[in-house]
Amino acid sequence: MAPTNDHPGEQAAHDPIKLIAIRETALSLDEVFKAVGDDAAGGTALFVGTVRNHDGGADVDELGYSCHPSAEAEMRRIAEKVVADFPVRALAAVHRVGDLKVGDLAVVVAVSCPHRGEAFEACRKLIDDLKHEAPIWKHQKFSDGTEEWVGA
């Protein structure tokens, strides 16, 4: 059966932004996944950004995220752009700030749409735009004693 846009479930939801947050505590995959649950969604895409043990050929021991007071509002603005461009049924994005260790979750975003392709594309757009536009900065500390600010 060919997809049509006649059914309300094929359209974006009325208020699809379910969760936007900056957190100083550990992030929950379950919370984000649950936030984007929608009976009309045939596809849900979830991206999890974790702290890795290296960057640019150097060993990372730890890092910290900080943000501008407007960061959460900017995340919402970015989410609104994604919602305007895709038939999003539900969207969630949560970013961590503070000191993190290797393996910790730094960001979790998820999008549900009527079809999987739309969900993948919308999720990719959401995380890429958050990374490039949200005023959130990473301070990395390397094993050799050097440090680096990213996104500042």
Image (cartoon, rainbow, N blue to C red):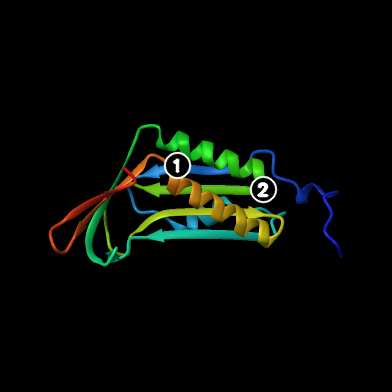
For the point 16% across and 64% down, which residue is it? 143
For the point 14% across and 63% down, which residue is it? 144
Q: Nearer the viewer, residue 41 or 72?
A: 72
Q: Is residue 37 visible?
A: no
Determine whether the residue tagged by mark 1 lies in a helix, strand or loop. Answer: helix
Q: Give the mark nearest the N terminus, 1 or 2.
A: 2
Q: Nearer the viewer, residue 69 or 143?
A: 143
Against 6, is 45 above or below?
A: below
Q: Is the C terminus in the top left, top right, bottom left or bottom right quadrant?
A: top left
Q: Nearer the viewer, residue 38 or 104?
A: 104
Residue annotated with mark 1: 133
Residue annotated with mark 2: 86
Q: Is the N terminus in the top left, top right, bottom left or bottom right quadrant?
A: bottom right
Determine whether the residue tagged by mark 2 lies in a helix, strand or loop. Answer: loop
* Whole-percent x, y for residue 9 in the image: 76, 50
Left or right of 69 in this view: 39? right
The amino acid beneath tag 2 is: Phe
